[in-house]
Image (cartoon, helix red, strand yellow):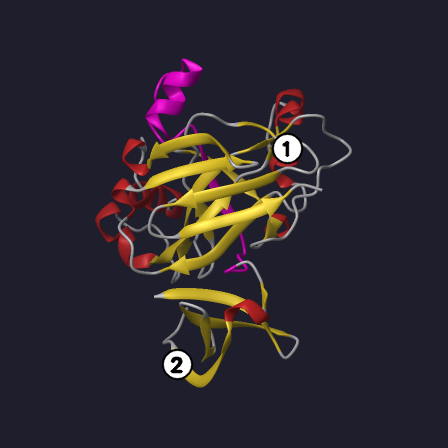
Amino acid sequence: MKLVRFVYRDIPRYGRLYEDQIELINGDPFSEVEPSGVSMNAQKVEWLSPVSPSKIIAVGLNYRDHAAELGMDLPDEPILFLKPPSAVIGQAESIVYPAASKQVEFEAELAAVIGKTASRVAVAEAGEYILGYTCANDVTARDLQKKDGQWARAKGFDTFCPLGPHIETELDPGELSINLSLNGQVKQASSTALMIHKVEEIISFASHVMTLLPGDVILTGTPPGVGPVAIGDVVQVDIEGIGSLRNNVT
């Protein structure tokens, strides 16, 4: 099932995507999905980010090929950091280049969306708490990350967490191609099979630190090839089984 979030009668609503049609659902997908019987053309609605999280938990250095690229040892545990909910934008919305930075970079990531409250869950049970998956771009002001020595400002600017285009609820994240193109040229190309810590491990680990709430987003790390963007660029994240997340830089 493909879940989208969009504006309907001036209110954010959820729907199920069927090719070029969206079927409005009553309520939200974190309870039982109830079709409303109302459908509309997907091209004629204002799409939003597919979820509005209370928090975004991200993982640093979680691909073996990325660690090799940087010449770094593999971490024993997931390296967690947070991005604020105010950083979230959706499909076709613009990444705004902040005046405070001179080196903004892209990071393609698979994002897991939490479906129900999770606290101290076991790895073997973590999959039960996942609603589905979407594409993400962990946009980062790399110069400020190095300058500050911690990541809150570098990762936290408004528009620095594009998500979308929809949530795919029927997906095995174990071996998916993940790519990023900048102005049509491939810059990142890898597979989720190269993750150091698998999705279920990350969710279990994070849930032993903080309670995960329905709609929370887990960013699972980026593969090698991260690099800079410039004003006017078009950035596209492609993940097998999900689709394409496309944003321009302004």
Count numbered badges in the picture.
2
Residue 6 found in image quarter: bottom right
Q: Is residue 110 left or right of residue 97?
A: left
Residue 183 as seen in the image, left or right of residue 193: right
Query: Disc 1 marks which residue?
Result: 154
**In the visual, does 139 lie left or right of 176?**
right
Residue depicted at x 49% and y 54%:
164
Residues drawn in magenta: 50-77
Label 1: few (<14), some (14–19) or many (≥20) C-alpha neighbours in 10 Å: many
The disc label shown at residue 165, or none: none
Q: Earlier in the sequence, mark 2 or mark 1?
A: 2
Residue plotted at (36% across, 57% down): 132
Q: Secondary structure at mark 1?
A: helix
Q: What residue occupies the far bottom of the structure in this picture?
A: 37
Q: Nearer the viewer, residue 191 or 246?
A: 246
Q: Is residue 123 magenta?
A: no
Which residue reaches farthest top?
71
Tell me the kind of residue under disc 1.
Ala
**Disc 2 from disc 1: Cα separation:** 40 Å
- Does residue 210 show up? no
Q: Residue at x 29, y 59 (%)?
A: 170
Q: Amino acid at mark 2?
A: Glu
Residue at the limit of the structure toward the left, as seen here: 124
Query: Which of the labelled discs sits on residue 34, or is there none?
Result: 2
Q: Residue 134, percent across and down?
A: 43, 52
Q: Residue 38 at what x, y percent from top left?
A: 47, 84
Image coordinates of residue 120 in percent, x first then y, are: 33, 50
Residue furthest to the right? 99
Compare residues 73 and 193 and report the one nearer the observer. Answer: 193
Q: Does the magenta-highlighted stretch encompass residue 58?
A: yes
Could you tell me if residue 119 is visible in this image? yes
**Quarter of the rendering occupied by the N terminus:** bottom left
